[in-house]
Image (cartoon, rainbow, N blue to C red):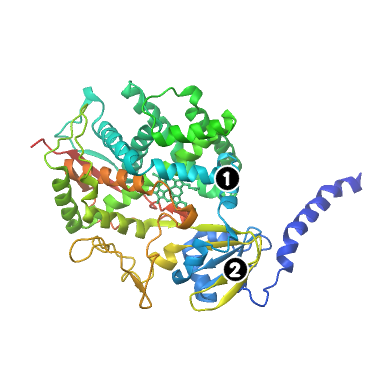
Amino acid sequence: MVLWSLVPGALLVVIVVYLCLPGLLRQRGPQEPPLDKGTVPWLGHAMALRKDMFEFMKHMWTKHGDVFTVQLGGQYFTFVMDPLSFGPILKDTQRKLDFSKYAEELVLKIFGYYAKGEKKQNIHSTSTKHLMGHDLEDLNKVMVDTLSLIMLGPKSRSLDASCWREDGLFHFCYNTMFKAGYLSLFGSTKDKEQDLLQAEEIFTHFLRFDHLFPKFLYSLLGPREWLEMGRLQRFFPKMLSMKHNQKEGISNWISSLRQFLREQGVAPHMQDKFNFMILWASQGNTGPATFWALLFLLKHPEAMQAVREEATQVLGGARLEAGQSFPLQPTALRCTPVLDSVMEETLRLRAAPTLCRVVCEDYILKMASGKEYLIRRGDMMALFPYLSVHMDPDIHPEPTAFKYDRFLNPDGSRKVDFYKAGKKIHHYSMPWGSGVSICPGRFFALSEMKLFVLLMVRYFDLELVDPDIPVAPVNPKRWGFGIMHPNHEVRFRYRLQPAE
Ligand code: HEM
């Protein structure tokens, strides 16, 4: 009896030893980068990274220099911090660094969706094809009308022109962008009121999922949160399932992806999970990004003035009216250099993704300095461009300041010439990732965010409830996942301007 009671304890010891032993035994090899395993077996530096990745990375960079390997939850990540050395990693002519493998594992864990490598590439190219060019022009038209529907309400309930409304700016932007993006991409019905109600319900759940997401990825959810996450993981595929959604005006992007999955013989329940993943990819960043863009504009009157003038120019005398299609000129979004610079600056300041590749075979990392490092098979290569690029004062002087014209040349054209150590730098801002995994929705994302900002500044009066409130700090638990969230809500007021 006594012996049997020792069995679970012995098993636990075996498991712990099995997990920790490789880490305890691993030593830095002759040609390898500095290795920092942290003090906690297996976990390594995972807790410090989760607490505040930006501070952690700054510390590691100062301690080890431009290349270092850290242990995070049993995995070894080699971070490269010199942007002049990014080229070979992102181009990967040696074909030893794999994005698909990493993405597949992540997607399986978060959405329960599994795709084979070949399918992944097709999905990427289908997405790129339908989120730019002609399809993008069609999407823009749908998007602007959907934004108008959400901002003004359905026909019968026009927003009272004289009345100020108060809301949290983050909630307002996320909610509006989510509903407009969701309805424009996934389609709608003739019953607009019902569509808005359904979109609102999905958004409420999406916010919860988004809130739990970073902790979930680090496997740090408490028991109740696990249960809630499980419920959410079942809710989205069900809500987005074709069985429950007979909609019109589904975007070419979504239709083509669905057709592709059907042709590949992907099981219906997997198709539903795929919808969930696509909802997350398409709606998780645009709302938070527009929040920061509007907040920066509200805090920088000269920038607001410049964007307002541009909005008046490109939208001309067009009126925003409930129940009516908005007469958007197809060229309008191509003539907004000031707003383009504002968006680029906003993304530089608040987009903080981690870009990862699995090392499939031992890999020689060639740095721009000429130094070479051996990276072991099975490790991960990682970039955190927010710190190494976006915040580099050599590339972007006063990097923490919002300068609305940072990406404008004196003649008003787009500025693309940036330098590091006197050398022209290709990767001077990387909100969308780069290389094989670059965001295929970036052109649509920019268009929809610009449409939202243009409508807000052109047709609404906007003000912060407390004009002296400093720009909200970011939530440090979300570094590495895309657009940062604020640490707290910011109250604002808005009202539809009287028709001229
Ligand atoms: C501000 C808005 C957005 C930002 C900052 C953003 C950024 C990113 C980043 C950093 C990645 C991953 C790159 C990597 O791992 O190397 C990504 C992937 C992706 N994004 Fe976006 N994105 C945005 C909006 C959108 C929109 C609106 C769509 C679609 C309509 C979209 C579709 C996708 C898809 C499908 C992927 C996965 C690509 C793949 O795994 O091959 N994104 N995005």
Q: Nearer the viewer, residue 442 or 287?
A: 442
SS of the residue under disc 2: strand
**Image coordinates for residue 494, horizontal then vertical, percent:** 21, 41
Q: Residues within 10 Å of mark 2 (few under 14, many from 20)?
A: many
Q: Is 456 rendered above or below residue 357? A: above
Task: Please tell me the numbered disc located at residue 69.
Answer: 2
Relative to residue 431, is residue 245 depicted above or below?
Answer: above
Which amino acid is tagged 2?
A: Thr
Q: Which mark is residue 118?
A: 1
C-alpha span from label 1 to label 2: 30 Å
Residue 278: which numbered mark, if any? none
Q: Position of residue 281 (x, y in %)?
A: 45, 44
| Type of the residue with mark 1 | Glu
Q: Report x, y in % for residue 395.
A: 35, 71
Q: Residue at x 60, y 66 (%)?
A: 70
Asked which secondary structure carries label 1, the reply is helix
Kindly indicate the quadrant of the structure image that contains residue 359: bottom right
Q: Which is in the foreground here, disc 1 or disc 2? A: 1
56 relative to 243, above or below: below
